[in-house]
């Protein structure tokens, strides 16, 4: 079966991590401070009273990170053999250990922390200044990729399970997600019939499917972002310009900060990387929880949009994917156009408390 690659492992995304900055610039700024031009301006918007579950289909989540305390629901490892280094599917959604089979690949450490980093952008609780767009959202971790890759079957089963649909041999998910975040890409240039049929089923059920546009350096969208009904998210830098690594396609309806090379602005957002909950190694080579400005890629733009939808649903739980597409223009701002795609009309996410609430 064809495999799909995790976005954060491509080319320009191998940038050095930096120490924690004063605040998560991508969320906005206090009224007394200047916000980054590309900030989504969700900072300070209170959540509504309605609970929201966001499924993170990724490399697994390291559940003991302080920035995710209180935010994780029981998840599942949907990887099947031979891609699963533990041998079979189970309720252990932790990522592969660094010394696991296939872990000699140069991308293994990035894969290990990828899901934890993505999850923290959606619902980080504020510890170590890792703050999600909707810190009260509940996260449903579903492992679909590991050191040995992934398969299409596992992805489809993971999407079904996350939505509360039956999957053969797996107990029914007791916490169905309203939003499914897919920070992965690399499939076909055309959405496969099986994937499109499932997306159609999920959207008809009222489930939002958000996918990273992909880090293919301004080429068209690939699966799953190119499926009808999937909200494809491209990446812009802190100053509202499309990042060079982001996919470029007129079908991309929304862009969000994805980070990249540092900017020469001298302003707080010049770091141009997203604050994430992650892990690094101490002096003795032991893994430790950390918070770093290192998020770079459309993988990290997508969860900002997933978090925004969760915040919106916390105020208006009856809303459906079709409602979002009709109301989306009021939450968008123009993005600097790019000559390479004359048909593109890029728009960036810009939240508004007045428009989020009924």
Image (cartoon, rainbow, N blue to C red):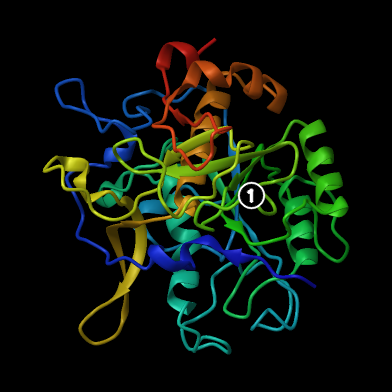
Q: Is residue 286 visible?
A: yes
Which of these two is toward me, 141 or 331?
A: 331
- Could you say whether the residue bearing mark 1 is in a helix, strand or loop? loop
Write the residue at 26% across / 39% down.
25
User: Where 6 falls versus 201 (above or below)?
Assistant: below
333 sits left or right of 84 in the view = left
Residue at the limit of the structure toward the left, as seen here: 266
Write the residue at 39% across / 23% down.
46
Rendered location of residue 103, percent (x, y): 51, 86
Q: For mark 1, what is the residue?
A: 221
Rendered location of residue 2, percent (x, y): 76, 70
Write the residue at 22% across / 42% down.
269
Q: Is residue 69 visible?
A: no
Hey, which quadrant is residue 4 in on the image? bottom right
How many neighbours does mark 1 have within 10 angstroms: few (below 14), some (14-19), or many (20 or more)? many
Rendered location of residue 144, percent (x, y): 66, 65
204 sits left or right of 11 in the view = right
**Number of dots carrying numbers:** 1
Hey, which quadrant is residue 42 in on the image? top left
Quadrant for the N terminus in the image: bottom right
User: Where 204 falls versus 105 (above or below)?
Assistant: above
Rendered location of residue 94, percent (x, y): 55, 69
Which of these two is toward me, 21 or 330?
A: 330
């Amino acid at each position: 079966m064809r495999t799909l690659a995790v976005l954060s492992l491509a080319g320009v995304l191998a940038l050095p991590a930096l120490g924690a900055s004063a605040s998560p610039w991508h969320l906005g700024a206090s009224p007394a401070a200047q916000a980054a031009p590309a900030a989504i301006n969700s900072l300070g918007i209170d959540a509504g009273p309605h609970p929201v579950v966001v499924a993170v289909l990724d490399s697994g989540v390291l559940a003991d990170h302080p920035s995710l305390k209180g935010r994780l629901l029981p998840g599942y490892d949907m990887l099947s053999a031979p891609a699963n280094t533990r041998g079979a599917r189970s309720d252990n959604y932790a990522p592969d250990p660094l010394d696991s089979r296939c872990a000699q690949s140069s991308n293994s450490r990035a894969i290990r922390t990828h899901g934890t980093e993505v999850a923290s952008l959606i619902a980080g609780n504020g510890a170590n200044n890792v703050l999600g767009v909707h810190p009260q959202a509940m996260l449903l971790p579903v492992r679909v990729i590991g050191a040995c890759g992934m398969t299409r079957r596992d992805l489809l089963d993971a999407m079904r399970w996350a939505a509360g649909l039956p999957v053969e041999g797996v107990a029914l998910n007791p916490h169905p997600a309203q939003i499914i975040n897919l920070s992965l890409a690399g499939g076909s240039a055309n959405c496969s019939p099986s994937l499109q049929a499932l997306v159609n089923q999920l959207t008809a059920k009222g489930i939002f499917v958000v996918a990273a546009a992909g880090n293919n350096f301004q080429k068209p969208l690939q699966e799953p972002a190119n499926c009808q009904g999937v909200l494809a998210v491209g990446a812009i830098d802190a100053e509202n310009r499309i990042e060079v690594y982001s996919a470029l396609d007129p079908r991309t309806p929304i862009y969000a900060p994805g980070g990249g090379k540092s900017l020469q602005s001298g302003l707080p957002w010049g770091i141009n990387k997203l604050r994430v909950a992650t892990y690094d190694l101490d002096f003795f080579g032991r893994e430790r929880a950390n918070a770093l400005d290192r998020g770079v890629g459309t993988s990290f733009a997508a969860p900002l949009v997933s978090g925004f939808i969760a915040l919106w649903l916390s105020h208006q739980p009856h809303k459906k994917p079709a409602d979002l597409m009709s109301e989306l223009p009021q939450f968008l701002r123009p993005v600097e156009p790019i000559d390479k795609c004359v048909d593109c009309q890029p728009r960036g996410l810009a939240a508004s408390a007045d428009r989020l609430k009924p």
